[in-house]
Structure formats: structure tokens, C-alpha cells
Image (tube, rainbow, N blue to C red):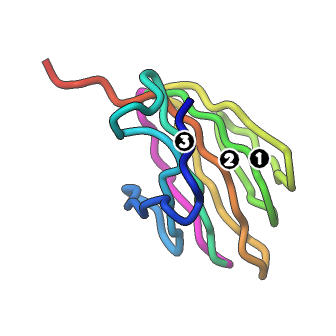
Amino acid sequence: MRVKRFQDAKPYEAPNHFAMKGLRLQGFEEGGPEKFWTGLSHFLPGGGAGPDSSPLEKVYVVVAGEVTVRAEGQEVVLGPLDSVCIGGNVVREVVNASNAVATMIVIMPYPEKAA
């Protein structure tokens, strides 16, 4: 069992994100999960990510506030405890269109290492 306290979470930068602060909750550390990592994203009002894609599938779980997610010609507003799974290579966009901070858990597999 590996416990990591919130106070010990380290910030990380995510490409093509704006007005967002990310914290790595689990992963990329000795003794952590072997197949995936978990982050916490705080999106300021007007903040977001994309549009872009990656070869990795991902799960978003909104903890507080709301975010609009656009992918595959669909648009959905997610609120607290709503979640979405986005497949690999799917172009997606995330936007906090509200005036409150939105907080979201992100769960993704590790990127494959270059051969």
C-alpha cells in the first residue's frame, strides 16, 4: 500500500493546457502504480485544454465545479462526480466556462517509452 498525502503532491505542467494547475496524486514515483498515473487539475474560469489528442485513453472525474468536454462531435457539461472516458487518438477539448474554479481528477496510462 502506498499512501501519498495531498500536501505532498507535486505540481506538473501539461502540454496545451491554459489557466490550469495540475498536481500529481499518484504515479511516476518508486512504489507507485505500474500501469497508470492520477492527477488533479484545477481549471480557473476560462481555463481549459486542447483541442488536441494523444494515443492514450483517459478518464476525467469532476470533483468540484463544472467543465465542458467536446469530443467526437459531442459536447457535454460535467458536474461533480460525473465522469467521462475518452479513447486514444480522440481529439478532445476541455473548457471551464463558469466563473468558479473547476477541479477534475485525471487517470491515464503511462506514455509508452520510445524504442
- Secondary structure category for the residue under label 3: strand
- Which of these two is toward me, 36 or 96? 36
Majority SS type along the magenta span: strand
Q: Give the crowd class for mark 3: few <14, some 14-19, many >=20 residues within 10 Å.
A: many
The image shows residue 98, relative to residue 61, as above or below, that is below
Q: Please give the residue where the numbered disc 3 appears in the rendered image.
A: 38
Q: Which residue is painted at 50% across and 25% down in the image?
A: 88
- Residue 62 shown left or right of residue 56 in the figure: right
- Disc 2 to disc 1, how far (Cα)? 4 Å
Report if residue 33 lies within the magenta region. Answer: no
In the image, residue 48 lies at what x, y percent?
Answer: 58, 64
Q: Give the crowd class for mark 1: few <14, some 14-19, many >=20 residues within 10 Å.
A: few
The image shows residue 81, relative to residue 66, as above or below, that is above
Q: Please give the residue where the numbered disc 2 appears in the rendered image.
A: 70
Residue type (three-letter) at the residue carrying disc 3? Thr
Earlier-in-chain disc, 3 versus 1: 3
Residue type (three-letter) at the residue carrying disc 2? Arg
The residue range painted magenta reads: 45-55
Q: Which residue is painted at 52% across and 75% down in the image?
A: 19
- Residue 115 shown left or right of residue 19 in the figure: left
Tell whether label 1 touches label 2 (CB within 8 Å). yes
In the image, residue 16 lies at what x, y percent?
Answer: 41, 58
